[in-house]
Amino acid sequence: MALFSARRAFSEPAAHPLTQSAGASSLGSLRAARRDSAAAERLVGLTPHRLRLDNVLDPVLGRLGSLEVRLATTDKEVRQAQRLRFNIFYDEMSAAPNCAALLSRRDCDEYDPFCDHLLVLDHAVARRPFRPAKPTVVGTYRLLRQDVANRHFGFYTACEYDIAPLLAAYPDLRFLELGRSCVLKPYRKKRTVELLWRGIWAYVLRHRIDVMMGCASLEGADPNKLALPLSFLHHYARAPKAWRARAEDGRYVAMDMLGKEAVDPKAALKTLPPLIKGYLRLGAAFGDGAVVDRQFATTDVLVVLPVSAISPRYIDHFGPVADRQAA
């Protein structure tokens, strides 16, 4: 279940070494995979996790029953988020892991060390025999602030969309990229999603964010089979020119496959992932063109959500909790 699913593996997909023929080529592939895995480990180890350095406020952003939303403060917690991402993106969904991901059983990339990682933990998970009770990570979201992105690789979104003109048009606004999001299947319920948004809203207030953006995924790598939802987003939720970014040349897939008169909005809404519908309710708009991510077997669309466009009733809903946590 993807929220803003901006996802990319650490390197290009490769065959699992155990599926190759025996011999020197297999051994060489295994060694290469181990080198890739070690590189991924070192990369994630780069984190002097920023929360330990520049965030002296309480990392806990909200609670709801046994569930807690918080920011990861250690490399161990980041690895827990990466394992959850692997379980959902690769084990449950149709993503094709590379050797490094298979060996580490974690989804990680070069952006992870510089992002903040939002976690939803369940404190009521049954205790395992002979093991102390530990809260379990059941949801995660990756957050990348513009000031941090500018010091490193930029935004991941730029791999799929030409966002440079959008950023240049609003030099005084603070952008936040949301991505790599997922929730464990038994927890894909209203309260978990609500808690994630409480955490995001608290983070937005804490860092005075003006605009949220990221890539949202529709399941399936054949845009023709997604003609109805893509056409609906184009005709009914396309961002105005001042907020519109276009898919990169060479990856651009036209979204207006159906004319507006051929789109039944009610039928189209039923085909959209629940969380894209949630973003629509918040006031989000969508970019120009879709992008097919063949590794993850998804079709991605760009979501842009200025904080000023969020409905006041949602701000009222998330505000009190967020205000208390951010104070």
Image: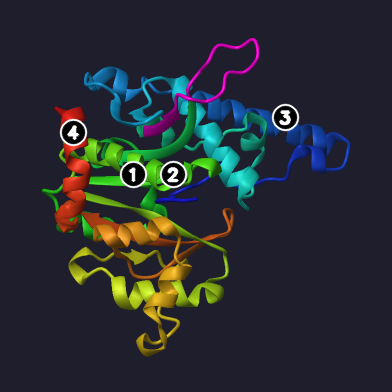
Q: Nearer the viewer, mark 2 or mark 3?
A: 2
Mark 2 or mark 4: name the one nearer the start of the chain.
2
Q: Which residue matches tag 4?
A: 206
Q: Do the residues labelled 3 and 4 touch (CB within 8 Å)?
A: no
Q: Which residue matches tag 3?
A: 31
Neighbourhood count class around disc 4 (C-alpha, 10 Å): few under 14, some 14–19, many 20 upward? some
Type of the residue with mark 2: Ser
From where the camera sits, is residue 184 visible? no
Type of the residue with mark 4: Arg
Q: Which residue matches tag 2?
A: 181
| Magenta-colored span | 117-135
Neighbourhood count class around disc 3 (C-alpha, 10 Å): few under 14, some 14–19, many 20 upward? few
Instruction: Report the front residue among 262 and 220.
Output: 262
Q: Which of marks 2 and 1 is in front?
A: 1
Mark 3 or mark 4: name the one nearer the start of the chain.
3
- Which residue is at a point 40% across and 80% down the rendered structure image? 256
Q: Where is residue 299 in the image (x, y as percent from the top left)?
A: 50, 63
Neighbourhood count class around disc 2 (C-alpha, 10 Å): few under 14, some 14–19, many 20 upward? many
